[in-house]
Image (cartoon, rainbow, N blue to C red):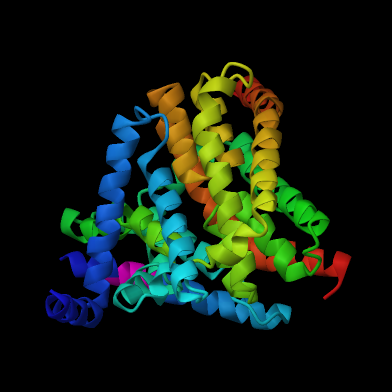
Amino acid sequence: MAIYGTALLSICLICGLLIGKLLGLILGIDANVGGVGIAMLMLILVSTRLEDRGLLPKPTQNGVLFWSSIYIPIVVAMSASQNVVAAMSGGTLAIITGTVVVLVCFALVPLISRIGRGNSETIGDES
Amino acid sequence: MNEAWQVLEAILTKYSLVTAFAFVGIILWISYRLSHHITRGRMHGSAIAILIGLLLAWVGGRITGGTKGITDIECLAGVGLMGGAMLRDFAIVATAFGVRLDEFLKTGLSGIVSLVTGVLSSFVIGAIIAYAFGYRDAISMTTIGGGAATYIVGPVTGSALGASSKVIALSVAAGLVKSILVMTLTPLAAKWIGLDNPRSALIFGGLMGTTSGVAGGLAATDERLVPYGAMTATFYTGLGCLLGPSLVFIVLRAIVGS
């Protein structure tokens, strides 16, 4: 049933948020520390385990996949809820930040490709 | 006529989340049409939809004088629920589904290095530019740095740390600029950065992180590279959400204080 997948997703998110909150308390910051990221890792680990044991039939998967496929619309709804009027006064900041980040990361691609290649050669030698 | 609108408005307001689904669905339909017919797919439909969303948020803010964009118009309040933290985080976690950890680990060191480098360099660049523009508290710098990562990491980091709506909106805008630039510039830069094999596509996805940007940019470069880039990019937002409100914030707070 689709609800099993959706429930699994919910449980992962709740657990992730709980761990994130506890991490925040431990670190002494009033914030949820990576709850969403932890929930994502949990979902990957749990769903991989379940799938390997054949416990993840198609209907169950659909209960998760629907929410994954509704991700872009939710992001659109999120963007429509933002305080854009206030942000417009700082529009240059957004453009400069976005541009610089993209250019720097483009330049990093060949640099890290080189590291990767070196690594794979080592593995090749060992085998 | 006026009465008819009042009846309709009452229904739209009462069933606000249903209204939001219809409203956002129409925005996406228009966006994908525009993407296909006007830009010939060069600009991804999702990017156009987000641009329209931001434009509507601006219109809403202008009309109502409120701080929550289009959702301050009563019958569109459901858009706020749909795009609020609860469903947003729920959908983000769902996107991790189907990514197999072992598949990713096979890519070895380069994938992880690109992810960590991509996330941290985005935060650093965003934070430095934020500082230069006068946002000198650790919360705002981290949030704008998160926006430089992706338009999801920014708001997730911002709401976790309690940043102002203005700063969160700025971070979304920065992430959107990044996403659009990745989509449009990738085919042009591909040759220059050696983006012509699965390994470099994986690294590219890890460095850029913006899922729609990477998916759109790689599709426009070489469709066969899309799954490789998208796989690492899927981890990026999670890693950013993990590192932003924790490590990055703590380090930045130690540097700039408060």
Please indicate whether residue B227 sits to the left or right of residue B154 in the image.
Answer: left
Above-or-below relation of A8 to A30 = above
Residue B203 in picture, x, y percent from top left: 58, 33
Residue A38 in picture, x, y percent from top left: 52, 65
Quarter placement of the C terminus of chain B: bottom right
Quarter of the figure with residue B172: bottom right
Quarter of the figure with residue A84: bottom right
Q: Residue at 57% x, 54% y: name it.
A: B173
Above-or-below relation of B143 to B8 = above
Please indicate whether residue B161 sits to the left or right of residue B76 in the image.
Answer: right
Quarter placement of the N terminus of chain B: bottom left
Residue B52 in picture, x, y percent from top left: 41, 52
Most extreme residue toward the front, as rendered? B1
Please indicate whether residue A123 sits to the left or right of residue B48 in the image.
Answer: right
Q: Residue at 71% x, 27% y: name it.
A: A111
Q: In this view of the protein, can residue A32 be seen by the observer?
A: yes
Above-or-below relation of B190 to B164 = above
Please indicate whether residue B228 sits to the left or right of residue B188 in the image.
Answer: left
Residue B242 in picture, x, y percent from top left: 60, 62
Quarter of the figure with residue A61: bottom left
Q: Nearer the viewer, residue A109 or A2?
A: A109
Our reading of the magenta stretch's main secondary structure is helix
Above-or-below relation of A4 to A54 = below
Q: Which residues are magenta?
A: A7-12
Q: Residue at 36% x, 30% y: name it.
A: B41
Q: In this view of the protein, can residue B104 be seen by the observer?
A: no
* Magenta stretch contains residue A92: no
Total marks placed: 0
Q: Nearer the viewer, residue B142 or B165?
A: B165
Q: Residue at 54% x, 28% y: name it.
A: B186
